[in-house]
Amino acid sequence: MNDNFSTTLVKAQQIKDYIKKQENGCTLTEIAKNVKLNKTTTYRLLQTLVTLKDLIKVNRRYYLNQHFNANYLPVGWLASRIVQPLVNKYELSAFLGMPFNQ
């Protein structure tokens, strides 16, 4: 590898590339094993990627933010605007649904 590269950024991109291939998200242990990083490094990188909103963590599983949102967008922007501040303030996960026939 070239001296001009940030190995930290390369590792973070490897994590994102791995998660992108997984339909049901990944746990920290799965990511560390498959990307061949120790759990401490993996944990720190995952926390950073969540803080930067590149990833979302739901029930111990990590998802790419854009992949996760693509699966759940049909909720409606109004509901999202109401719930998002609560999610951000209290560091919660929220799932919203709307009936399609009503």
Image: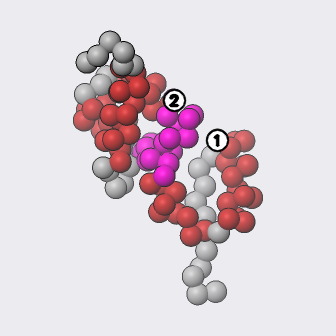
The quadrant of the rendering that contains the N terminus is top left
Q: Which residues are magenta?
A: 48-66
Indicate left or right for 94 with 63 as reference.
Answer: right
In the picture shown, does residue 50 fall above or below 71?
above
Neighbours of disc 2 within 10 Å: few (<14), some (14-19), many (20+): some
Q: Tell me which corner region of the image, top left, top right, bottom left or bottom right, holds residue 79.
A: bottom right
Which residue position holds label 2?
48
Residue 47 is left or right of residue 19, and the answer is right
Identity of the residue drawn at 41% across and 26% down: 9
- Residue at left offset 60%, top offset 68%: 75
Q: Secondary structure at mark 1?
A: loop
- Residue 86, how many percent across, how many down? 72, 49
Looking at the image, which residue sits at the far bottom?
101
Number of residues whose C-alpha sits closer than 10 Å to that of mark 1, classed few (under 14), some (14–19) or many (20 or more): few
Q: State yes or no: residue 55 in magenta.
A: yes
In this figure, which residue is indicated by the disc labeled 1?
91
Q: Assess whether residue 14 is covered by the magenta stretch.
A: no
Left or right: 60 in relation to 77: left
User: Where does the image place residue 13, in percent across and percent down from the top left?
Assistant: 37, 34
Residues at discs 2 and 1 in contact (Cβ within 8 Å): no
At label 2, which amino acid type do we have?
A: Thr
